[in-house]
């Protein structure tokens, strides 16, 4: 679980490194998914041949397709787009809010009561994000439209991803984590390809700097495929509650990696804000009886 959290968190740093070569969002995304898709396709074929995939009804296929587009690809695109404007550290802190969004969405959809304990945890999380965002503003010296846009893009990425988790909660137990993940990622790959094809681009996929292909391959293997398997294996061994605890290493890992590879400053407000967010998410995910 710890390796999974660190590997997932490295994605933001890789995206920032790729942007330094002038690559656009859709091109980088289609490269990432092109390198990752063969792994997921191989898994899907193996699961099908070994009879480990439940029979899918037409309705299931429609739901999975919608989830793959809206819940698989759209949050990914919003996240990559937001990273063009905000620091890698702030991006990871905002994304880490998704458990709080799951609580709020569940309350609205299923009528679940949000208690004082959870309200306090939510307050800690959002205060922490405000501090971390304030640290980014101070580092730049002014509040820019780009900073606001980037924060909003990553925020909605986390919000939509939380909705995707709530919506997929009934399909995953029936289909299994591996089959569901493989199909969702394949749909997301096709969506990334379609999105790329309908937009104009300054450079073709074959005319990019060599470094971009290397970063995209590294992102696909290290920050996409491997951590998704490690996540599944970790949840199987330690349970989802303890898995969430290890996932809290993600924001800290991103801040350290961004400092080492991107030269992003580590400010006091960012550190305090990160601590607030981790404390808030811990309070929610460690709630007795929560899985």
Image (cartoon, rainbow, N blue to C red):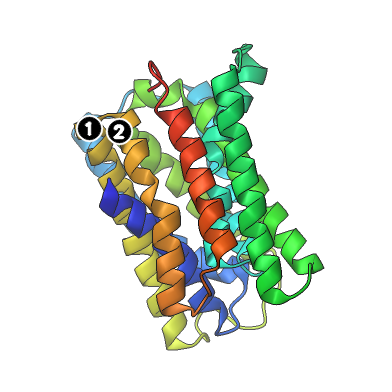
Q: Is residue 152 above or below residue 283?
A: below
Q: Is residue 128 above or below residue 48?
A: below
Q: Secondary structure at mark 1?
A: helix
Task: Give the alpha-carbon distance from disc 2 to disc 1, as whole Å.
Answer: 6 Å
Percent of width and height locating residue 47: 25, 37
Image point (71%, 73%), residue name: 200
Figure quadrant of residue 242:
top left
What residue do we see at 40% from left, 53% from top?
A: 250
* Front residue of 151 and 166: 151
Q: Are marks 2 and 1 in contact (CB under 8 Å)?
A: yes
Give the labeled residue for mark 2.
242
Q: In this image, 82 relative to 28: left or right? A: right
How many numbered marks have been drawn onto this rendered protein structure? 2
Q: Which mark is residue 238?
A: 1
> Is residue 229 rendered to the left or right of residue 67?
left
Local SS, label 2:
helix
Residue 113 percent location from the top left of the image: 61, 12
**What residue lies at 65% left-to-right and 73% top-to-bottom?**
139
Pick the quarter of the image with the C terminus: top left
């Amino acid at each position: 679980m710890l390796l999974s959290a660190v590997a997932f968190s490295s994605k933001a740093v890789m995206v920032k490194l790729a942007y330094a070569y002038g690559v656009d969002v859709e091109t980088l995304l289609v490269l990432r998914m092109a390198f990752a898709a063969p792994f997921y396709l191989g898994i899907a074929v193996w699961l099908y041949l070994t009879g480990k995939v439940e029979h899918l009804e037409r309705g299931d296929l429609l739901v999975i397709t919608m989830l793959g587009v809206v819940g698989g690809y759209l949050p990914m695109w919003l996240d990559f787009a937001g990273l063009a404007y905000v620091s890698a550290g702030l991006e990871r802190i905002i994304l880490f809010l998704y458990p709080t969004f799951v609580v709020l969405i569940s309350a609205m959809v299923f009528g679940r009561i949000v208690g004082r304990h959870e309200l306090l945890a939510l307050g800690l999380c959002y205060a922490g994000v405000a501090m971390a965002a304030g640290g980014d503003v101070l580092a730049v010296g002014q509040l820019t439209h780009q900073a606001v846009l980037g924060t909003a893009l990553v925020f909605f990425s986390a919000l939509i991803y939380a909705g995707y988790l709530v919506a997929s909660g009934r399909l995953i137990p029936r289909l299994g984590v591996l089959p569901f993940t493989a199909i969702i990622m394949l749909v997301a790959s096709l969506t990334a390809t379609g999105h790329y094809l309908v937009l104009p681009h300054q450079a073709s996929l074959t005319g990019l700097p060599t470094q971009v292909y290397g970063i995209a391959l590294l992102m696909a293997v290290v920050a996409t495929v491997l951590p998704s398997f490690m996540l599944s294996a970790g949840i199987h061994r330690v349970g989802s509650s303890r898995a969430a605890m290890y996932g809290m290493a993600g924001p800290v890992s991103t801040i350290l990696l961004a400092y080492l590879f991107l030269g992003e400053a580590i400010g006091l407000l960012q550190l305090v804000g990160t601590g607030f967010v981790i404390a808030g998410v811990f309070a929610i995910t460690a709630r007795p009886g929560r899985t």
